[in-house]
Amino acid sequence: MSDDLLPIGRFARLCRLSVKQLRHYDDLGLLVPARVDPASGYRYYRPAQARDALSIGLLRSLDVPLPMVGPTA
């Protein structure tokens, strides 16, 4: 694994989101992890993805519906 990848829990704390939210955003294609372990399905994110995660969190705090947020990629 690359040194610049963060496990989902650490990334969630960094972005003030829950692991459950990150999984949901991945399922919707809003914030796709940089890497998913093929054996365990564990998600890893790059620090540079924090901007997108924080943007999604901000929009959600303003009650913007997820379909309006759209893919960030």
Image (cartoon, rainbow, N blue to C red):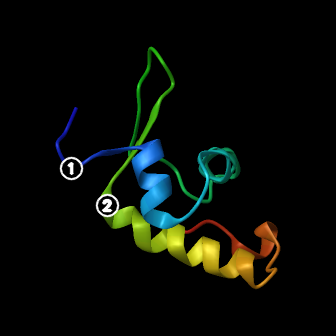
Q: In the rendered image, is residue 73 in sight?
A: no
Badge 1: few (under 14), some or many (20 or more) residues near its Cα, within 10 Å?
Answer: few
Residue lying at 54% horizontally and 65% vertically, measured from the top left: 16
**Residue 4, numbered circle:** 1
- Residue 73, image x and y in percent? 50, 65
User: Mark 1 or 2 closer to N-term?
Assistant: 1
Left or right: residue 61 versus residue 12 is right
- Residue 32, image x and y in percent? 52, 50
Q: In the rendered image, is residue 56 in sight?
A: yes
Residue beneath disc 2: 47
Residue lying at 68% horizontally and 44% vertically, measured from the top left: 27
Q: Nearer the viewer, residue 63 or 9?
A: 9
- Residue 17, image x and y in percent? 58, 60
The answer to whether the residue labelled 1 contacts the one labelled 2, judged by CB atoms less than 8 Å apart, is yes
Q: Nearer the viewer, residue 21 or 34?
A: 21
Left or right: residue 2 versus residue 21 is left
In the rendered structure, which amino acid carries the disc numbered 2?
Answer: Pro
Report how far apart the C-alphas of labels 1 and 2 lie in the structure. Answer: 7 Å
Q: Quadrant of residue 31?
A: bottom right
